[in-house]
Amino acid sequence: MPASDIAAIEAVLHTYLDGLYEGDTAKLGAAFHPCAHLYSEKDGTVADLPREDWFAWVKSRDNPKAKGLAREDRILMIDQSGPECAVAKVACQIPPRYFTDYLVFLKTGEGWKIVSKVFRADIRD
């Protein structure tokens, strides 16, 4: 795959991680396609959160940057299967919650966008 695609996906991932840390829904909106949903497991069922509902939650909470929390996010893996489809795995944290995110990308007319996020969190002391 073209190195330019990987660089573009990495740029979206950095925008996403900055948005998470700063609580900046404009940055998150630049990374996530409007149709995006977030999925997780809750009590044995699938929790499905539309992007806009997640943004409302992000706006309502204190962001990690304002709280002075440590930032140790990292890109663990990017796998591109074709010119328009890729997946990435990232690690990030809002202590005491430590997240693993699986992000599905599609290349749109506006560039690479996250269309789906599946995540889990570990709670640590």
Image (spheres, rainbow, N blue to C red):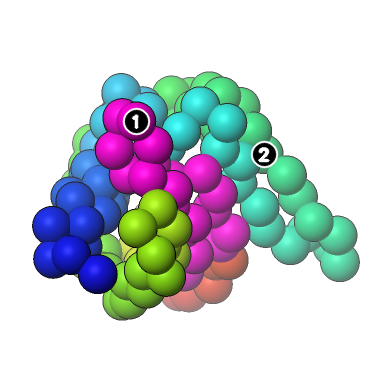
**Which badge, 2 or 1, comes first in the chain's sequence?**
2
Secondary structure at numbered mark 2: strand
Q: Amino acid at mark 1?
A: Gly
Q: Is residue 57 visible?
A: no
- Find residue 30 and report its horizontal and vertical position in percent: 31, 30
Q: Quadrant of residue 5?
A: bottom left
Residue of label 2: 49
> Relative to 32, does residue 103 appear above or below in the rendering?
below
Residue 118 picture location, percent across and down:
58, 59
**Residue 59 badge:** none
Q: Is residue 75 visible?
A: yes
**The furthest residue to the right:** 44
State whether the magenta stretch is mostly helix, strand or loop: strand
Q: Residue at x 49, y 56 (%)?
A: 104
Q: Which residues are magenta?
A: 97-119
Classify residue 54 by image quadrant.
top right
